[in-house]
Image: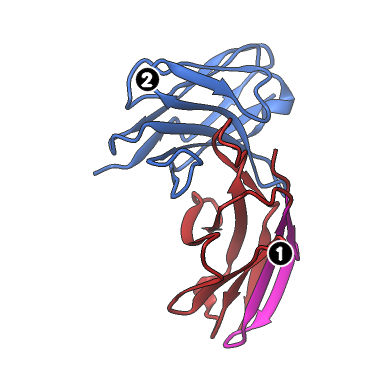
Chain colours: A blue, B red
Amino acid sequence: NAGVTQTPKFRILKIGQSMTLQCAQDMNHNYMYWYRQDPGMGLKLIYYSVGAGITDKGEVPNGYNVSRSTTEDFPLRLELAAPSQTSVYFCASSIHREGTEAFFGQGTRLTVV
Amino acid sequence: GENVEQHPSTLSVQEGDSAVIKCTYSDSASNYFPWYKQELGKRPQLIIDIRSNVGEKKDQRIAVTLNKTAKHFSLHITETQPEDSAVYFCAAPRDSGGGADGLTFGKGTHLIIQP
């Protein structure tokens, strides 16, 4: 049972490049989330999904897009990367609506230069 | 939406002493309050949580208390050990009205256990 798996673990992007952060869970959780963590700022919600085919914006969605074609996968797309997107990104899944008892992936450390 | 304030930002205690971290929330309808521990370079991990129908919950050396009237909840760690050194985050449901999902996190407390 792998839980929540994120790839890649580290990435350096140049300004203006695009990339997709992958997230997969094998717990059959309906609810999935993308958070970003900046130093000293806690975690902020980017996007979330309540099930396959359904996504919605969180607190800081600008510059990102998501899709949810299956229950297992919830990729996060960065278009036209900017230095402000330098952060650690965590994917999480939960069996509960409010993200209670959320299980986090190991994170992706992204640097935009 | 919910607003969560956490303090202190850094807490240094002697090994064996107790540590207390406090959080306040803004939405009186919030009903679930988890605490996460994050070691350096690792993912956040849920260590304890409490729902609004109880005032206290314990799990070995850690406990969480909730004061709904004052809208604050606290994490208590007793007999602290070196492995307790980490950053601790409190959280609350982002929108308790059921119109949105996910958690709102505090900014974290860096707990340092001095030998």
Task: Provide residue A23's location: percent of width, then percent of height.
Answer: 41, 29
Circle 1 is placed at which residue position? B69
Closer-to-camera residue (B11/B63): B63
Which numbered marker is on residue A52? 2
Assign the C terminus of chain B to one quadrant of the image: bottom right
- Picture coordinates of residue B70, whole percent (x, y): 74, 64
* Alpha carbon distance from label 1 to label 2: 38 Å
| Image mark 2: chain | A
Report the predominant secondary structure element of the magenta stretch. Answer: strand
Closer to the eye: label 1 or 2: 1
Which residue is pictured at 65% across the width and 11% down the height?
A80
Comparing A47 with A16, the one in front is A47
From what the image shows, is residue B62 above or below residue B33? below
Question: Could you tell whether A29 is left or right of A82 in the image?
Answer: left
Foreground of the two, A104 or A22 = A104
Residue type highlighted by circle 2: Ala
Magenta residues span B4-25
Q: Residue at x 57, y 69 (%)?
A: B85
Residue at screen point 68% across, 62% down: B109
Whether B13 is among the magenta residues is yes
